[in-house]
Image (cartoon, helix red, strand yellow):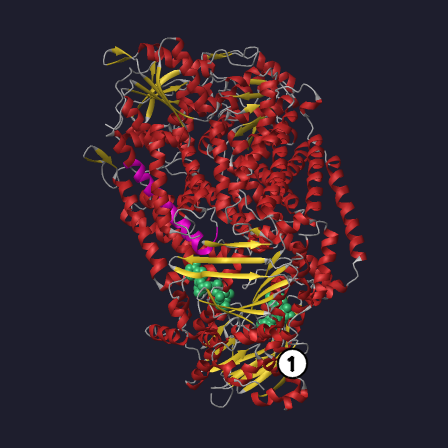
Amino acid sequence: MWCTAPSSSSSAVSRQAGWPRSGLGCGPGGHAVADDAPLLEARDIVVAFGSFRAVDGASLAIRKGEIIGLIGPNGAGKSTFFNCLAGERQPASGSIMLRGRDVTRASPEDHALLGLARSWQVPAVFDDMSVHENVMVGAFLRHPHAAEAAAAADQVIDFTGLRPVARARSGSLGTPARKRLEIARALATEPEILLLDEALAGLTPTEVRAAIDLVRQIHARGITLVIVEHVMEVILSLAHRAVVFNQGKVIAQGAPRDVVQDPGVIEAYLGRSLSRKPPA
Amino acid sequence: QGAPVKVGTLLPLTGVAASAGGSAKAAIELAVELINTPQPDLASMPLMATSGFPGLGGRPLQVVIADQQGSPSVAQNQALRLITQERVVAITNGYQSGLVQTASAIAERHGIPYVTGEAVATNLTERGFRWFFRTTPIGPDIAAIYVEFLQSARVNGRPVTKVAIVNENTEYGTSIAEVIRRTAEARGIGIALQIPYAANSADVSAQVLQLKDAQPDVAIFISYTSDAILYARTMRAQGYRPPILIGDNSGFSDDNFVQTAGDIAQGIINRSAFDPSRPGSNSFKVNALYKARTGREMDDTTARIMQGFLVTCDAINRAGATEPAAIQKALRETNLDAGQLMIGYRGVKFDEKGQNSMASVLLVQLRGREYISVWPEATATAPLQLPYKGWE
Amino acid sequence: MILAQVVLNGFLVGAVYALFSSGLTLIWGMMNVVNFAHGDFVMIAMYVAFVAFTMLHLGPAIFVPLAAIMLFLLGVLVYYALVRHVMRGPMLAQILGTFGLALVLRYATLWVFSANFVSLPENLLGEVQTFAGLRLEPSRVAAGLAALGLTIGLHLLLTHTALGSRLLAVAEDRSAAMLVGIRPDPMQALAWGLGAACTGVAGALIALFFYITPTVGESLALIAFVVVCLGGFGSVPGALVAGLAIGIIESLSAFWIGPAFKDLVVFILFLAVLWFRPQGLLGKA
Amino acid sequence: MNAGPLLAVRHLEVRYGDLVGVADVSLEVRQGEVVALLGSNGAGKTTVLNAIMGLVRPAAGEVLWAGAPIGGLPAFAVVGRGLALAPEGWRLFVNQTVEQNLRLGATPLRDRRREAELLERVFAFLPRLKERRRQSAGTLSGGERQMLAVGRALMSAPRLLLLDEPSLGLAPAIVEMMYEKLAALRGEGMTLLIAEQSVELALEIADRGYVIQTGRSVLEGPAAELARSPEVQRAYLGIGGEEGAA
Amino acid sequence: MSAATIPTAPRAAGRWVLGVAALAALLAWPLLVEDEFIQRIGALVMLSALSASAWNLVGGYAGQISIGHVLFFGCGAYASLLGFTWFEWAPILGAPFGIATSLLLALIVGSPTLRLKGHYFSMATIALAELARIVVVNTPALGGAVGVSGPAMPRSVLDLSFISPLPYYYIFGSVLAVLLLFTWWMSRGRMGFYLRAIRGQERAARSLGVPAQRYKLFALLVSAAFTSLTGSLYAAMLGFVDPDSGLGILLSVKMVIAAALGGAGTLFGPLVGSAILVPLEEMTNAAFGGGGTGITYVVYGAIIVLISRFAPGGLAEIWTWLRARGTRRGG
Ligand SMILES: Nc1ncnc2c1ncn2[C@@H]1O[C@H](COP(=O)(O)OP(=O)(O)OP(=O)(O)O)[C@@H](O)[C@H]1O
Ligand SMILES: Nc1ncnc2c1ncn2[C@@H]1O[C@H](COP(=O)(O)OP(=O)(O)OP(=O)(O)O)[C@@H](O)[C@H]1O
Ligand SMILES: [Mg+2]
Ligand SMILES: [Mg+2]
């Protein structure tokens, strides 16, 4: 069903005609929708800080092979929701199923073991280790031996284009490079599902384009993705389905191109500019 | 003349016992001076009339003082250093029993005489060591005098029935408390209350209140200096005075205690072997010399340390040689009588285990800033005054 | 009656604990620096009081502020000479540096004053008072009041003033503080000075009823660390609450269970609290 | 002062140990201008801004503020002269509240009374911060942190405001609003130097721009010209030459 | 960056030569020095390096600053000497029991305390060690405050009671070699990476599937075992332990100091730190201790202060710096 999403809004696609391979939508991951049971499913998640409900009954089902774009205004609760999905935070109520298992109260390391990896919005790299070593920490999850882990890390580093800085101390990296490293590190755990929290922020449009390619390649490896991103281009060109958060609730979801036309979404999130700019 | 004869002395010059170590160091240095220069005034004591060691052709004495830092391991290191680097002919003292134990083990292995003047743990002379000697009275001697005193003492005209012991719970306090309890119970005096406490407390008021609550006839404190001072102050603050207050030796005989808390602990009874209050006695003269040197009274611990050192020197002199075996032999043959000592022992004569069989103790009482011997009556300089006055 | 006295004594001792912990928690909270020399700062302050009293014949009204000033200067000096550089390194460097400093202070004092015990007259602030059968030492009451005053003062300073906010800002992120125009070194020196000055007040007041010797800080320091941790690192009110709690618990357990076990009780309770509140009583999660 | 530029950076070089962060960058910012600093990842934008602010020491080259050298001055001194930076990575005081963070931003002000007024202005500028004023900064969402970083820099009422990727992590609507308000600030006489990854946006608001590449200045000019420059389009906008011309 | 392109072969060879030379020196020097006191200091350096290296696993690599490691040291020391007191065993035969007790204790106390962060963990470990000390002081069966002694007179070689310090030096040295080999092996493998990751960013590490708690506990277990063994060796050499010398905080602090001085979290840091601290301590004591003025510790403390002032990262920092300079010159 979601495979048809990108093509349904062909007008938007044409605006980006110059960009390579955009609007392709359904990547090779599309093969994986064999069974209908969601890979990861969150039901009625609530997270409260005192009286303030950062996440207020949000639900989301992610099927294998999907790329979900999670958008919403600042402070809508996206990262908090993410943290619940990754086992970092336990919701006050609601449940989370990963591959049919209830992981609502499972630890982050169990999530990782079950094939869920994530990046952090506020980068959390191991400053005192080199980039390569950072990635190795991730690789050790599936390759207990140092030599194999190093080899696996090398592959990921090449794949993510971190080769030039592989030996650098990761504490010396700038924010965008750290985010890239976060992706690499998460990939090295060989996840089935990858949660990216603004991992592509801080890139120039050209770099965003390259990063989109990277994400596509990740997807092509059969990895399901959930991405939070404020750069609409990323959502539009990558996501099969956009989910809009506002004040802790899902206010809209559907094909990205439809969602961005939604007046509620425009009002809450996009502002006038996107709607004002007429499609070329 | 000739090259000086080196004797090693281990003392706690840093750490919590540094204050005692400092006093002892001054006494040892005094002893060296007394031996190396003629002291006609003290002629009744060996080596005093002459200079240096006459038995060794007048060679002077040199002491090498080492700091054991309150650590058994350092004590051992320093003993080894004294033996192998300083080439001392004998080692004396050591202070805490545990440290004496480890340091003397090194001396034993290297075949060097070790003489302690103050460590009281009974087991030290039970180890079958051949090079180890001890001049001080030990637990049973101490317990005996307390118990005899308690048997004869009267509170409001009736015999003492209720005794409380407050002891710090390291080796010194535990072992003394234990031996007093055993001896007392063997002689039919029950210990009504025993309060072990951790040394160097920030606050001791709970102990004092417990005593105040229990109202014993006699309170016996076994403490180091810091706690002794706090007890005196806290008892005053809490307005508590037992009819008889005994402060066992260590902390209470320390001149630091007398100087800082003596005024509020008048009449406290202490166990001592050193009574400098009788003019003309060796103790009196040595104390005067010590006071001239340091400005402080010599306390019992310091005096026992000094006596142990002097006994060692006497043995070296009698050995007529610096070979360890000769000194060991001379030590075994030691036979000093009371008049040859600077302290109130009946004499110095080692039994087969190396323990001085002539060591003895007496009781003294604080008057002003001086301890006066009051018991047994035969050797007392002044009559006992009861009840305990404290701060009045 | 005795029990009331036990609790009262515990309360006053607890106040003293709080008093000599306030400086430690301040330095700890504002610099994230472990001051292993804290006990020795207390000791130095006690000697300042001692020297001021016996040699200069100054009363408590003068020597307490004098100790505060002297210790302030010591704190500033230590900051510029040592801590500033040590903070470049890992936390272990602070342990190393302040442990070395502790030895230097302790034994330099021993060098100058010898290991002998000294003390101030016990009635400098007047005689023991009896209220409703309870005995009160004026010097301990003074220490208790000072603890309360300092705690409230420091807490207000840290939470309700721009200066406090700046002090905390430097502690959190030195270069970010520079970025908003704060000169970090004077601020941190001030934090050390203030922490040391509190310690100075504490030491001078404790000298009124405690003995003084170069190693006295050692036995006090451990309690200070426990108080600060139990209260929550950096929390000044936490130190007060924890100090009082420890004082009373110690006193009661010493009375009931026996003084040899009072530390046992305190440490067990301490670990129990950490089990349920890993950030201390009033610490931030 | 009206003669020379407000800020001039000449042949700036910054080293991180053995690594060269910035090799040779020169730029000028005149009073009342908005200048964009462009460059790809790791080009050295952040390093230039940090060097201007005194967070890192230049190894060579000059930084002149109103004609006086400020290169190598510590950051607090630079801030005292009327510059402020919303840094990369935000550098918030995460244990203090939003309001305390903002008030800390006002430290360089001589006149304390203006603090309240500026606080209101920032709250008006970024209303979300007002909602969250009592919350500790460490619990803010990513976008809220960005707002706070910008707000804190504004609190010192600087003459020159340096922004390091201010749109990072902000929702589109907020970005738009912020840029509008920045334009307004400029109207009030504030000068702006913006390092921005959203090249389009930056060139929209800027008067002039500089492009740096691997630590060297490579291009400069009026914003509109840069936007049309094929090099910029290819390198940063990812737009093919022919499309840019269209 | 340019460093990476320098061919590594000559450097690696150089490192081997250097390593073999260092090893030879370590083995040979005590034989060349006749002075027993110096030899004994050598043995004590090894002993200190052993405990500091064991501590380093938890405190350095895993970044959990334990100041209660004396707890494990005490287990070893007490097990050895209690074995003798109760059953007349040679002290070293008590070592396995000390290790077993330490492991048990580490397991029991590890899981709750390792949850704690930073200073809270440090304080909790101090509290635990103090608890143990107080319990021992008040338990006559464990020697109480008096302590327990080993055999007064050596009965067989097993008593490890030697007059010369040399055997101690080599025994301690070989155990240290085993520990360092383990550390080296560990630091290069998964465990080393995981521990460093935990030390850096525990949250992030966990999200990468690092079972932080389990690894910290494992590091604690290994560390406790070796610390306990050190305690047993110490007791065998000294023949005496009491609550202060076997369970006192100062000992914990010394482990931390030795590791920090040389460079915590580095392989040889604790050895280097011990090689400086122990002789420094003994030499200053030998030189000034008898004076009774406390100058010993003024000098000792001042040197520690100076090192922390000029090399806060430990002497390893200076080493790295020198090497960086060397390669820059060479390159
Ligand atoms: N401890 C807390 N107390 C109060 N509010 C909190 C706390 N932690 C988070 N919040 C609030 O919860 C809201 C949700 O934050 P979250 O990080 O999930 O937002 P987000 O959708 O990821 O936003 P962004 O796009 O800016 O990253 C924010 O407004 C934040 O300020
Ligand atoms: N602290 C540091 N230590 C070592 N190298 C550093 C450090 N900070 C930056 N660098 C290096 O300096 C160069 C310039 O980095 P800088 O962060 O200034 O770039 P930038 O243009 O801001 O890029 P970004 O888009 O990533 O923010 C990069 O090669 C970077 O790796
Ligand atoms: Mg977020
Ligand atoms: Mg940057």
Location of mark 1 (residue): D238
Which of C142/C47 is in front?
C142
Which of E20/A153 is in front?
A153
Crowd rating for badge 1 (residues with CA inside 10 Å; few <14, some 14–19, many 20+): many
Considering the image in quadrants, where does the N terminus of chain A appear? bottom right
> Which quarter of the figure has residue E162?
top right
Task: Say whether residue C14 is visible.
Answer: yes
**Position of residue E109 in the picture relative to residue C209 (left or right):** right
Ligand 2 near label 1 (Cβ, under 8 Å)?
A: no
The subunit carrying tag 1 is D
Ligand 4 image-quadrant field: bottom right
- Relative to E221, is C197 above or below? below
Residue C30 on the magenta segment: yes
Please state the horizontal and vertical placement of residue A57, each as a whole percent of the image. Answer: 45, 60
Please state the horizontal and vertical placement of residue B373, each as a whole percent of the image. Answer: 34, 17
**Position of residue E26 in the picture relative to residue A172 (left or right):** right
* Numbered label tally: 1
Which of B98/A256 is in front?
A256
Farthest top residue? B187
**The disc labelled 1 sits on which kind of residue?**
Gly
- Relative to B137, is C219 above or below? below
Q: In the image, which residues are magenta?
A: C8-33
* Predominant SS along the magenta part: helix
